[in-house]
Amino acid sequence: MKRIVLYLVALGVILFIVKALAPLIVLGVVGLVLLAWRRPETVTRLTDRAQLARVPSWMRATPMRFAGSIAFVGFVLVGVTAPIGAANSDPDPSPTPAPVAVARETQTPAPTPTERPTPSPTVRPTARPTASPEPAPVFGEEPTGPTQLGTVVGVTDGDTIKVDVAGVVYDVRYIGVSTPEINGPVEWLGPEASTANGELVAGKRVLLEQDVSETDQYGRLLRHVWVEDGSGWLLVNLELVRLGFAAVTTFPPDVKYIDELYVPAQATAQTASLGLWVPPPTPAPTPVPVAAPIAPIAAPIAPVAPAGNCELSYPGLCIPIGSADINCGDIAARGFQVVWTVPNPDPHGFDRDADGIGCES
């Protein structure tokens, strides 16, 4: 009985050593076979040693037989120990998860609050439950692109506002729309568009949705502006078009909502004759000032002649008494190119059309 126990102990020690040295044993026996093949005289000197006299002679008959026998024994021992190592190294692939056991224990109410077991941190599940995916944003009803949250601190006009984003104030230009101007020459409906814009966003928290471009040529942020209206998100750019205060204006590549939202809203506003789509009032004509009648220029006074030697019918002009064949041409030749009043009688016939004006042409 003792001998059997010793044999079992020895076998266990051998198997342990074989398991620990399995790679070396494999390399050794492979090397011994190669040595018996290429250098058989070396193996022969090894088998002739007195220490190997107990090895059966049939195993030592040739170097290759000796090497093959040793290789066979080595591979058998390694093959026997391999399942043992695999059994010790591989855990049960389907153990009962520790979190389930803890859950069953905590579901049983403890007799008293002080005796309730505290879950051990080592067995607490490390993975968080996967959150339910959020629904995808609805196009046209909420932002679908990158956004920034800010507060409107000023309204510049109908399509430009000032927004505080994380302590920095930016000028924000609405994408895809244009409203009448109020800076410089005030355009028709410009003040009304600015007022409508202020009623929608002034002092409110807004979401600034980027399209493609970051800024315009003036350094203003280009954004679609969203504001909460109590029932959801309202696209301010679209609302100004819908009310008729803004017209659709495209600057590619920022055309995200143009065809689907802005253009149909503008067509509806045009059909309903809202805002910009009402014909502007015709300005009243500016009265043309009526020029005052030009007073006749006094005729130049002829050289002074003796009063008794001038025709009395032509005051302001001295025509000598008794002058014959004097006409308007003679008057012009003398330098008198003015029209004067001719009282009757008209001895020289200066007033041919009898209208009281002589030498009119």
Image (tube, rainbow, N blue to C red):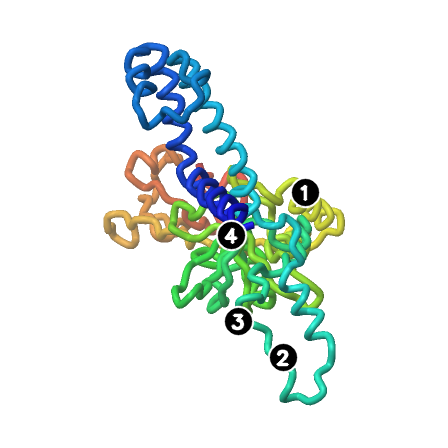
- The answer to whether any part of residue 77 appears in the image is yes
Q: Closer to the N terminus: mark 4 or mark 3?
A: 3
Q: CA distance from mark 2 to mark 4?
A: 56 Å
Mark 2–mark 4 CB contact (< 8 Å): no
Q: Amino acid at mark 3?
A: Gly
Give the CA separation, mark 4 to mark 1.
17 Å
For the point 65% across and 60% down, the residue is 233
Find residue 117 and name its label: 2
Q: Which residue is mark 4?
A: 223
Q: Are marks 2 and 3 in contact (CB under 8 Å)?
A: no
Q: How many marks?
A: 4
Residue 234 drawn at (x, y percent): 65, 59
Q: Nearer the viewer, residue 144 or 235?
A: 144
Q: Mark 1 or mark 3, which has the lower sequence index?
A: 3
Vertical placement of residue 118 versus 145, above or below: below
How much space separates mark 2 and mark 3, taking CA atoms? 54 Å
Quadrant that contains the C terminus: top left
Quadrant location of residue 98?
A: bottom right
